Image: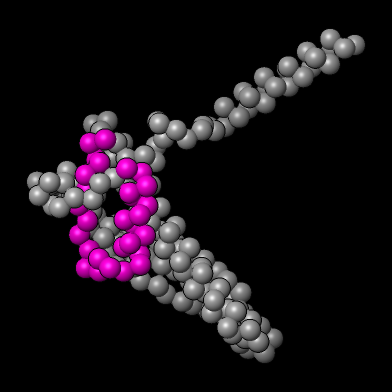
Amino acid sequence: MLYLNYYFRQILIILFSSAVIACGFQLRGEDSKFLIPADWGKIALITSSPRSEFTQQVILVFQATGVEWSPISSASYILTLKPAKLSQHFQSLNSIASPSEIELTLTSYISISRKDGMEILPEVKLFVRRRINNNPANATGVNEQINLTISEMRRQLAENILRRISTLAHVVNRE
């Protein structure tokens, strides 16, 4: 009886491990798809708003993966980043006809080119969308929630840009 439980547990562990592997789960590590390859380590950034909070967030996210921001003369690739634009739309009304749900959309456009000017990724629109509840009785709390959500959206959009460029870098390196 004791041996039967032991074998049953071992079979369950093997089946569970096989199921996790079969669904595509993998730990992130040295071979992560979201790491930038070594030859993409020097990137130049062209933007019309270099001091904006969004641009600073993009710089931090890329530096965390080992990207070194370089001047155009010494960079391998050039990232052109347009300023992030926030749009706010009211999605639904409550019983007293005031907005009860707000949709926030943060949008930016990026393009990637080589140092020699050849465009690798034409201008692409990337966006992050969030919905928050609006409580007219708590205007201060809602404004703070909006500010916090916008800051989270900036980080998420910067990570989306990194993800897009990382995927592109792996595809270009395979060719």
Classify 16 as above or below 78.
above
Taking the magenta stretch, the answer to whether it contains residue 41 is: yes
Q: Position of residue 64 (x, y in %)?
A: 37, 47
The quarter holding residue 14 reads: top right
- Image quadrant containing the C terminus: top left
156 displayed left or right of 142:
left
Tell me the residue at 36%/44% (across/down): 65
Read off the magenta span. 38-66
Q: Is residue 53 left or right of residue 27?
A: left
Residue depicted at 9% across the width and 49% down the height = 73
Regarding residue 14, the answer to whether it shows in the image is yes
In the displayed structure, 150 sits above or below 156; it is below
- Horizontal and vertical percent for residue 148? 51, 69
Q: Is residue 57 magenta?
A: yes
Relative image position of residue 84 (x, y in whole percent)? 34, 67
Q: Is residue 19 above or below residue 74?
A: above
Residue lying furthest right in this view? 1
Q: Position of residue 30 (x, y in %)?
A: 40, 31
Residue placed at 63% from the left, 24% from the top? 17
Among the 4 quarters of the image, the one containing residue 131? bottom right
Front residue of 39/109: it is 39
Name the side, left or right, on which 97 lies relative to 114. right
Work out whether residue 42 or residue 175 is closer to the camera in this orientation and state it: 42
Q: Is residue 171 above or below residue 21?
A: below
In the image, what residue occupies the spot 21% across and 68% down? Answer: 48
- Residue nearest the observer in this picture, 98 or 147: 147
Residue 74 located left or right of residue 53? left
In front: 114, or 41? 41
